[in-house]
Image (tube, helix red, strand yellow):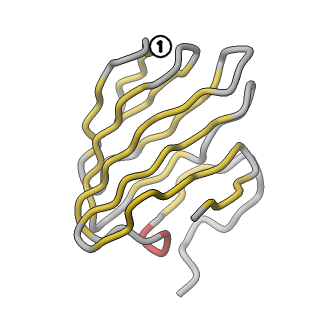
Amino acid sequence: MIVEKPWGKVATYALNQPSSVRIITIEPGQTTSEHYHQLRDEMWVVLDDGLRIQVGNRVVDARTGEEFVVRAEEPHRITNTGERRGRVLEIAHGYTTEDDTFRLQDDYGRPLEPSW
């Protein structure tokens, strides 16, 4: 299943409760919303250079192969500062649907609260 986003896309390869496996693709110059999830943890593996990873107050210009753990309720975002598409492998554990996304900031005017 592929979900188009204003900043790129999310391709889900396994969606099971309590886990999912996704490839997050961010277009050059784009950024995800700063958001958190109440009911899941995520583990990210950076697949391409040029991505800036924010987890909580920590911001890192990541390199290919770096891994990040995002705990439930921890704000996070991915920004592509490079000139090519950037990808992150995401393995999520817990409640893994999009209605558990609470945005803190969004450059695309999307609602901050999930629509149930």
Say which residue label 1 marks: 61
Farthest residue toward the bottom? 116
Q: Which residue occupies 24% across, 48% down?
A: 71
Q: Position of residue 67 (x, y in %)?
A: 29, 26
Q: Position of residue 17 (x, y in %)?
A: 26, 74
Lateral position of residue 106 relative to residue 54, left or right: right
Q: Quadrant of residue 84?
A: top right
Instruction: Count up the numbered dots.
Output: 1
Q: Quadrant of residue 26?
A: top right
Lateral position of residue 91 relative to residue 25, left or right: left
Q: Position of residue 58 (x, y in %)?
A: 35, 24
Q: Which one is nearer the viewer's eye here, 8 or 11?
A: 11
**As displayed, is residue 3 above or below residue 64?**
below
Lateral position of residue 79 relative to residue 23, left or right: right
Q: What residue type is labelled 1?
A: Asp
**As displayed, is residue 29 above or below residue 56?**
above
